[in-house]
Image (tube, rainbow, N blue to C red):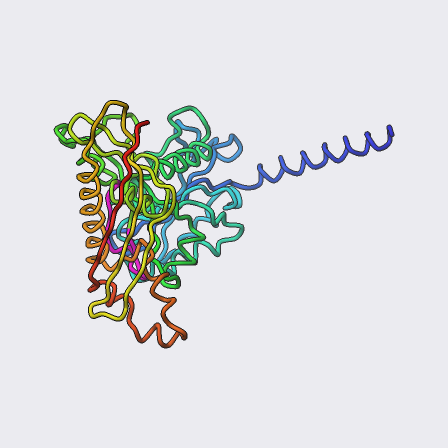
Amino acid sequence: MKRILFFLMLCCILLTGCNERQVEEELLVIVLAIDQTEDHRCLTAIKVPANTSASSSSSDREDSGYLLLQAEGDHFADAISMLNATTPRRLNFSQVREVIIGEAVSKQTGFITLLQQIDNLPRFRCSAAVIICQGEAMEFIKEQKPYVGMRLSRYAENTLASNAGKGFTPSTDLCAGVRDLGFGFSDPLFILGAVNNFNHSENQSEEKSLDTKAGSLPRKSLEAIEMFGAAATDGISVCGYISGYEMALIHLLSGHVEALTMQQGSITLHITVGKPASLSVDISQTPIVLHISLQCEALYSPGSNPDIVLVENQLQKDLLTLISHLQSIRCDGIGFGDVAVKNFLTIPDWESFNWRVQYAQAAVQAKVKVLGKEK
């Protein structure tokens, strides 16, 4: 028994030593950012923990305890190769929490290829969130700091989970983006990020505040970066943006929403759902018809007397406006394509149907049933 205990203790010591040596020999990348320069070159940056051995002589060390390292190249592969060649340690991408892509890069036709190249990096953590940044990704990554006192990786993870849970951002990660963009039957929505300069107007109603996007939220904070709303795609690249309220409606249709509230005079209603909305596509008509049937509950304080029919009409109007917006930018972010494809027996039949054009021109019908309930 003593020999076994001694052997186990020896293994623990040896394994611990190997792990410490590996950390010293590698830089753990927490955030990866990609931008386009004025001369159309690729600018790539990473944030890594600034341990003493790797950063004692670096001018890029931040007060937050992280290094910001940058490199340029003719394209992403060149930039990442230069970054690898000039960093003091080998880069380890297994702990990446966020991939931040600048606005100019995200709208290029090579956006799909870029996501695939990122996913193909050695040991890359493909469950990393993809954030499309209005403006430049470099400005976003420079402002990103763990303000609440925890390390950046945990802070980023908790912030992303909190935002997605509230329903104002999507939860699409790199794995899902690579899988669905251009190859799936629905278009992925990515987190929309921006840096807020806090020059917004203070006279906005609550409803309008939720119907805004990252970078223009009516708030004041030490933390200038915002993640609110989504970047929509059209099978090729980012084609437009949707607001936080529109994203909450999409979560409502999928059967999950946490923070969708409606105001009716002095009455506040909290909208909840028990199951996803029913989607159907009628391809026998010209134009085709997209159908939505949604049943939800409106919770309100005891003694209140809200007009439930008014709530139904408002939700129906908002859903029709949302779908019209998505059609105008040719983004099937709700997933009607997943339903429509079941009407076809072969891939050639589906391709000849020209779904994206049919979707953009489709008529839309929405039916909303709301059950009022006291909390």
Q: Residue at x 43, y 52 (%)?
A: 80
Residue 312 appears in the figure: yes
Stretch in magenta: 232-244
Q: Residue at x 45, y 53 (%)?
A: 175
Counting from the top left corner in percent of width and height, residue 277 is at 33, 50
- Left or right: where 156 falls relative to 10: left
Query: Residue 306, located in which quarter of the rendered image?
Result: top left
Question: Where, quadrant-wise, is the N terminus in this rendering?
Answer: top right
Query: Residue 63, located in which quarter of the rendered image?
Result: top left
Counting from the top left corner in percent of width and height, residue 221 is at 27, 26
Which of these two is toward me, 94 or 269? 269
The correct choice, above or below, for 353 with respect to 122 in the image is below
Residue 59 appears in the figure: no
Q: Quick check: is 240 in the magenta stretch?
A: yes
Q: Residue at x 67, y 34 (%)?
A: 16
The correct choice, above or below, for 298 with respect to 121 in the image is above
Q: Residue at x 38, y 66 (%)?
A: 342
The correct choice, above or below, for 312 with respect to 147 in the image is below
Q: Number of labelled discs?
A: 0
Which of these two is toward me, 77 or 236? 236
Counting from the top left corner in percent of width and height, residue 127 is at 47, 47
Counting from the top left corner in percent of width and height, residue 318 is at 20, 45
Question: Where, quadrant-wise, is the C terminus in this rendering?
Answer: top left
Q: Quick check: is 198 in the magenta stretch?
A: no
Which of these two is toward me, 50 or 56? 50
